Image: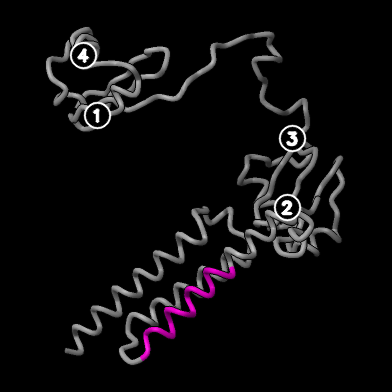
Amino acid sequence: MSFLILCLTALGSFGALFLSAKLIGHKQIAQLDFFDYIAGITIGSIAAEMATDLETPWKSMTAMLIYGGVTVLLSVVSNRFPRTRKYLNGTPTILMDHGKLYRENLKKAKLDLSEFMVMCRQQGYFDLSNIQTAVFEYNGKLTILPVSSQRPATPNDLNLAPEQELLFTELIMDGQILEDNLKRMGLDLAWLTKQLEQSHIHSAEDVFLALCDRNLKFVLYKK
């Protein structure tokens, strides 16, 4: 009986954790601010405790939902009232500008010079003279604006007008034809069969992946 209760509480813990994650939303670790990160760890810890709490699992579930609800509430407040963002999320800090490093701002961001140098090298900047402005974002990520003479050339710089690239849609994956995607593109099986024949392929089962864009550019990879 106790084993059955343990299974039920574990499933309940999983469900509550899933619900809390859905409430908070899908963010990558790099996009989380400090509060979201701590709240996520706390919710995970409570979920682990709930999975083995056979007597009062509802207490842990309530705590998880409260943490998730408060996190969502703060997100709504920051979106509805932009002025509150600097208190809830913090503000970006300029660490370097026009070749000058700001020691006080480094202290405010709780970074030392070696950590700043590491973050610059991770983005490919080994020479600080190539950096025009470096901003430490509230999510802990360093954003760098390079010196204009050091940034990569763009087609506009070269007076070129390349054709706009479009998103590709999967038509075949691991030998299986995705008919819904085919219809969404306004295509049919006859068109797909013709494309395969032109590539000297007799069956979709021989295709690992096939893609097509709105310009009918067809790309495939054989198994």
Residue type marked 3:
Pro
Of tags 3 and 4, which is closer to the observer?
A: 4
User: Would you say residue 130 sits in the magenta stretch?
Assistant: no
Q: Distance between the residues labelled 3 and 2?
A: 15 Å
- Between 118 and 178, the one lying in front of the other is 178
Q: Callout 3: 10 Å neighbours few (<14), some, many (20+)?
A: some
Q: Please, which residue is most extreme toward the bottom here? A: 55
Which residue position holds label 3? 146
Q: Residue at x 29, y 16 (%)?
A: 187
In the image, which residues are magenta?
56-70
Which residue position holds label 2? 136
> In what element is the residue under mark 3?
strand
| Quarter of the view holding residue 77 | bottom right
Q: How far apart are marks 4 and 1 (CA)?
A: 15 Å
> In what element is the residue under mark 4?
helix
Q: On the rendered image, what quadrant is the C terminus found in?
A: top left
Task: Of the two numbered discs 4 and 2 on the same chain, state the one appearing first in sequence.
Answer: 2
Q: Which residue is drawn at 64% across and 9% down?
A: 160
